[in-house]
Image (spheres, rainbow, N blue to C red):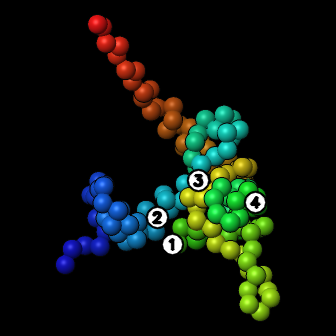
Amino acid sequence: MKKKFSTAWKGSKQPRKQRKYRHNAPLHVRSSFMNVMLSKELVAKHKVKRLRIRLGDKVKVMRGKNKGKEGKVDVLNVKKSNVKMTGVEVSKKDGSKAKAPIQVSNLMIVELNLDDKKRLESKKAAAATAPAPKKAKALNA
């Protein structure tokens, strides 16, 4: 029987293989799936487009029935790749309210939790050392 998860896997066009990779990934790899885009203001300020979501970040829902709602992240579930936040609730049959899980891909970070000063340092260093994109050569006719 083949291994469930391969570290040598490079990618595939086939959705079934992409889903299998994400489903069988260990938690340390699934953690990298928790990256969320930043708002335009934060991108301009920090020079980074995406960051891993953390507890205490203020996020905005971009898709779904709760689109436009904002709130702070209360619970992160790396195994299921979802988030529970204040302001997004569902009512249960017994009348009580519960926080609804939201997929990470449907969120945008509006305000960062910068309790940890090193949170942005590694991303900025990686962006500074990355090579600049190559410009396309003009064809001489």
Kindly identify the amino acid type of the residue bearing the numbered disc 4: Lys
Left/right of residue 84 with respect to residue 77 in the rendered view: right
Mark 4–mark 3 distance (CA, rounded to whole Å): 16 Å
Q: Which labelled disc corresponds to residue 79?
A: 1
Is label 4 or label 2 in front?
A: 4
Q: Which labelled disc corresponds to residue 36?
A: 3
Query: In this orientation, which residue lies closer to the viewer: 94 or 141?
Result: 141
Mark before the other along the chain sequence, 4 or 2? 2
Kindly identify the amino acid type of the residue bearing the numbered disc 1: Lys
Q: Quadrant of residue 35?
A: bottom right
Asked if one can make out residue 42 in the rendered structure from this viewpoint, the answer is yes
Q: Quadrant of residue 120?
A: top right
Q: Provide the residue designation for mark 4.
A: 69
Kindly identify the amino acid type of the residue bearing the numbered disc 2: Arg
Secondary structure type for disc 3: strand
Q: Provide the residue designation for mark 2.
A: 30
Q: Is residue 133 above or below residue 93?
A: above
Is label 4 or label 3 in front?
A: 4
Kindly identify the amino acid type of the residue bearing the numbered disc 3: Val
Q: Are marks 1 and 4 in contact (CB under 8 Å)?
A: no
Q: Are marks 4 and 3 in contact (CB under 8 Å)?
A: no
The location of residue 33, given as percent across then percent down, is: 49, 59
The location of residue 102, given as percent across then percent down, is: 63, 67
